[in-house]
Image (tube, coloured by chain):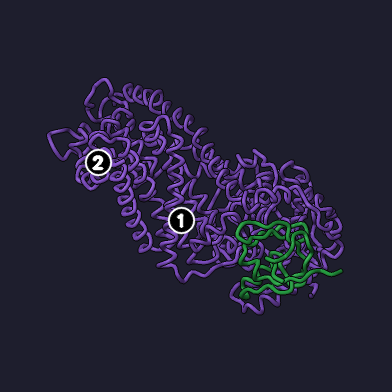
Chain colours: A purple, B green
Amino acid sequence: MTDCHGGTQRARPVGVGDSGPRAAGVSVAAAGTTMVALRILLLGNPNVGKSTLFNAVSGANQGVVNAPGTTVELEVGTWPTVDGAPEVVDLPGTYSLLARSPDEQVAADAVTRRGVAAGTGSDLVVVLVDATSVSRSLYLLAQVAEAGRPIVAALTMVDRAAEHGLDVDPAALAAAIGVPVVAVDARTGAGIPALAGAVARAFGEPRYARGVAVRDAPADRTEDLAAQLEHAEQLFAWVESATAHLAAPAAARRTLSDRIDRVLLNPWVGVPVFLAVMWALFDLVTRVAAPLMTLVSTVVAGPAADGVRAVLAGAGLGGGWVEGLTVDGVLAGVGTVLAFVPLMAVMFVAVGVLESSGYFARAAFVADKAMRGIGLDGRAVLPLIVGFGCNVPALAATRTLPNARQRLLTGLLVPYTSCTARLTVYLLLASIFFPGDAGTVVFAMYLLSVLFVVGGGLLLRGTMFRDLRREPLALVLPSYQRPALRPLLLSAWPRVRGFVVKAGRVIVAALLVIWLLMAIPVRGAHPVAQVPVEDSLYGATATAVAPVLAPAGLDDWHVSAALMAGFVAKEVVVGSFAQSYAVTAPADPSSAGNLAEQLQQTLTRSSGGEPGVAALALLVFVLAYTPCLATVAEQRRMFGRRWAMGSLGVQLVVAWVAAVLVFQIGRLA
Amino acid sequence: MKLRDCPLDTEVRVRAVRFEADVALRMREIGLRPGGTVRVTQRAAFGGRVVAIGAARLAVDGETAGCIDVELVTS
């Protein structure tokens, strides 16, 4: 190939369009006197330690944003130890700039300045080179070089390579490819200062890969496939030349990961282990998060509410509609959101442990056959598992599937994965109606959720998705490693914060609307905000809807009111129950405010003396019907209004039929 | 011989990767290239295989493993 770089410094034209989103920048010596904002793009194959490196260099200075015009999330931070604290962006992992998914397209666009990322200039690309798979990493690096980007290479997984008898010398590799190569171990921090130094020097003296010609029009998927293959062979030849000095790995060396895989991927052991890991994950969430949720709720409903009432009373606003709006509307909504935080945090960290330990990829591999049975490949298990945390990011995760029909099918199934928001309702009902078997009931709900996903997938695959093309599964398996807690916490925090902000607005707004509906009288001569719920606009609506639920033993306005609120978000269901009972004169004054007793009485009455069976029907209804407005909105955005509305309608029908079946069959038992 | 039929821990050379061109390109990008040497390290459920490509490990499902032609490395 033509050597047009020679690994030497090269002045880079600097223009307005190159400026990144940062207001502040770093001076670039090679660019003369022009001051430009600089960005560092972290690019690499999946599972090479990119996010760990990002967390190590940015620390707490990070957040999560969507790539422009997409739902692909990018972690963006600053690198404070590099002069000028430049912005650093953790791009989605990819094997190639010839993107096969929207996530990969975001990475490719950021590097090549095409499409949605055009104009968001990239000034330096830190390419992570996996020491266990140098050739695969250098192929990607060569594509970056073709795009004319200056490069610094971060050599990762050196310890893993050593297990295979591979000794990758950074200096020799740097000499071969023409750009700085720094060995790093982001888990321990080793090499990070040296990498920061290399990055700082590269801003002043940019380095380009030797032996790779810059292409005026970087390769993309619009090219003829034969041309793509032919060009890829040229890059493979460059990679082969650049890695000629490397020794081959020791033949047939069996590593610790191989030995673990002998057990975890064994045909007879792999599936039970997979199920056990999933069970352990949710048992952990149940046991650890539930007491924390209770604690937060208690604090908000007790001391916090008392404090707000005292402040309002001091301001002469106590006892009226202002107090009701503030305490029963705003504070109740905030409390619901805050109570949800421990659950989300535990879930994100737990999923992070699975990912960083290397087991997540094995889970996708083990689940491949089951996914293939419903027309998906093993990769679909990832968004479906994420769905058990939250359906909204799960829908975004379907974008990693390379086939649009697969994305749609997965996106239609995601709402049946039981998100953690629904767990709050499960815990409430299970602890009230099945106090001795609450854990078993909650676990059964997750199993039922899996059955809904599989059944729904089979139904759709055999009807509307018969055209679905099968994609071969080829997953790179990272080595097993012990997860490091700090990067997991750093990574989980912005996600939890994002959820709180995103869901919190909806929840608080929804509860305010509910409070307002409850404040408007439709019967009787009540003043505004002093209306018994039955006489309010909200109660009237819930009362009108309730008979529809009679075949499921749930003909009660408290239940229909809570389920109506659940359209907004499942976290609201518990709050709605509490709110409706709190403003209703209880049948027994000694149990005022006791939600458990109130619900017992309600379901006993609505079911004709079968409260346990009715509770099961309610649990099934909550599992199957629309998760939240955010999910509907995301489905609509991704798949269009027709699919979103159709999905919503089917969810309601499925939920009603399943709840009726549970109640009618259950009361016969 | 298909990759799916490979004995464990035996070096084989990839002869052909029989997929449509776009999939074949991705296979090459992740390391499954005709002429390359690989080794099956693990048999998984439903015909899945874990393949060593150098120091890396690649998991392929049974159907995919049946679309990759290999031959024993004799020397």
Circle 1 is placed at which residue position? A454
Give the residue type at disc 1.
Val
Q: Give the quadrant of the N terminus of chain A.
A: bottom right
Give the residue type at disc 2.
Leu
Question: Residue A628: in sight, yes or no?
Answer: no
Label 2 CA crowd tier, 10 Å (few <14, some 14–19, many 20+): some
Measured from the top left, where is residue A72 in percent x and y?
53, 57
Q: Earlier in the sequence, mark 2 or mark 1?
A: 1
Circle 2 is placed at which residue position? A517
Measured from the top left, where is residue A15 in percent x and y?
64, 64
Question: Residue A293: in sight, yes or no?
Answer: yes
Element under label 1? helix
**Residue positioned 39% across, 35% down in the render:** A430
Quarter of the figure with residue A217: bottom right
Distance, label 2 to label 1, CA atoms, is 39 Å
**Residue positioned 48% across, 50% down in the render:** A387
Front one among A629 and B5: B5
> Left or right: A588 with respect to A52?
left
**Residue positioned 34% across, 30% down in the render:** A327
Q: Give the quadrant of the C terminus of chain A.
A: top left
> Left or right: A332 with respect to A89?
left
Which chain's residue wears label 2?
A: A
> Left or right: A234 with respect to A99?
right
Q: Does A470 sit above or below residue A509?
A: below
Total tally of numbered discs in the picture = 2
Element under label 2? helix
Which chain's residue wears label 1?
A: A
Measured from the top left, where is residue A135 in percent x and y?
76, 63
Measured from the top left, where is residue A356 in percent x and y?
65, 46
Q: Residue furthest left?
A: A525
